[in-house]
């Protein structure tokens, strides 16, 4: 799997958009970008994923650059409950040789302030 | 309720005493995986399984064993635990038996293991 690079920490004011960047410059054509978050020491929670098109769901939006070397997770109206560690990972589609092996990295600690 | 369960949730043991952490999922998922989480090191994959009787090493498999004899269960075995295996362990599962890109992982609540 391609490696990802994320800033170690970010701050955001409550009610504002939180934009979390991720670099994955070695991503290959069949690898998807996934985002998870972990609140305290709970099990990580899936947020969103994409291949090359921008994606949106009820939790967040994912913007992937045209060259796919980086992406941004957007929480449009951050709340205090969004304070968590956010992980960006890349994963091959089923059938890819590296499908099963995943590297989470250390993620970005997002702190949402009142 | 769709879920991944782990037992025990907390365990304190001594060096060399064999232990098993169980993981079970009720979502008929093909793929299952074990991770450990340590301060400053994030989540690191120990072993994963693509389906019954198919397992493979992750990034940190040393000192661990796994088995996948049935689809729903994926136990993590520490034959001779050592203090450096003190950690927070997570089990996860996802679909993976079809040609689909959608493979969100569902994580268990975690098992906090202390080896003295």
Image (cartoon, rainbow, N blue to C red):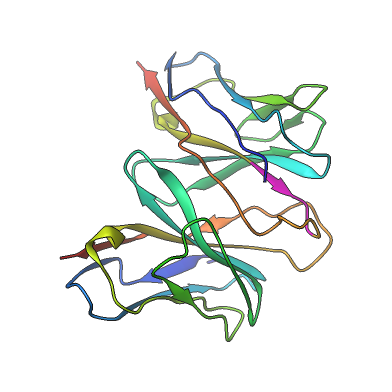
Q: Position of residue B106 (x, y in %)?
A: 55, 57
Q: Nearer the viewer, residue B60 or A35?
A: B60
> Number of marks in the image?
0
Say above or below: A92 vs B55.
above
Q: Which residues are magenta?
A: A90-94
Can residue A62 be seen here? The reply is yes
Q: Quadrant of residue B51?
A: bottom right
* Most common secondary structure along the magenta stretch: strand
> Which quadrant does the C terminus of chain A fall into?
top left
Residue drawn where x is 23% and y is 77% of the image: B16
Say above or below: A76 vs B22.
above
Q: Position of residue A13 (x, y in %)?
A: 42, 13
Residue drawn where x is 81% and y is 23% of the image: A67
Residue drawn where x is 82% and y is 45% of the image: A30
Residue drawn where x is 71% and y is 56% of the image: A99
Say above or below: A83 vs B45.
above
Q: Position of residue B97 (x, y in %)?
A: 76, 69
Q: Nearer the viewer, residue B56 or A48?
A: B56
């Amino acid at each position: 799997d391609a490696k990802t690079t994320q800033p170690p920490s970010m701050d955001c004011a409550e009610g504002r958009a939180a934009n979390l960047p991720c670099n994955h410059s070695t991503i290959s054509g069949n690898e998807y970008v996934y985002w998870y978050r972990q609140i305290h020491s709970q099990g990580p929670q899936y947020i969103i994923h994409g291949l090359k098109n921008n994606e949106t769901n009820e939790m967040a939006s994912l913007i992937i650059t045209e060259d796919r070397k980086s992406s941004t997770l957007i929480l449009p109206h951050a709340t205090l409950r969004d304070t968590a560690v956010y992980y960006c990972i890349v994963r091959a589609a089923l059938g890819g040789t590296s499908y099963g092996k995943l590297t989470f990295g250390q993620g970005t600690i997002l702190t949402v302030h009142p | 309720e769709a879920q991944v369960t782990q037992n025990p949730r907390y365990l304190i043991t001594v060096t060399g005493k064999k232990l098993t952490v169980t993981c079970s999922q009720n979502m008929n998922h093909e793929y299952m995986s074990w991770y450990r989480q340590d301060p400053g090191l994030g989540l690191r994959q120990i072993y994963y399984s693509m389906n019954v009787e198919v397992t493979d090493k992750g990034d940190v498999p040393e000192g661990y064993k796994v088995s996948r004899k049935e689809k729903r269960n994926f136990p993590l075995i520490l034959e001779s635990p050592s203090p450096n295996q003190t950690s927070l362990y997570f089990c996860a599962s996802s679909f993976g038996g079809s040609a689909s890109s959608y493979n969100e992982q569902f994580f268990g609540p975690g098992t906090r293991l202390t080896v003295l």
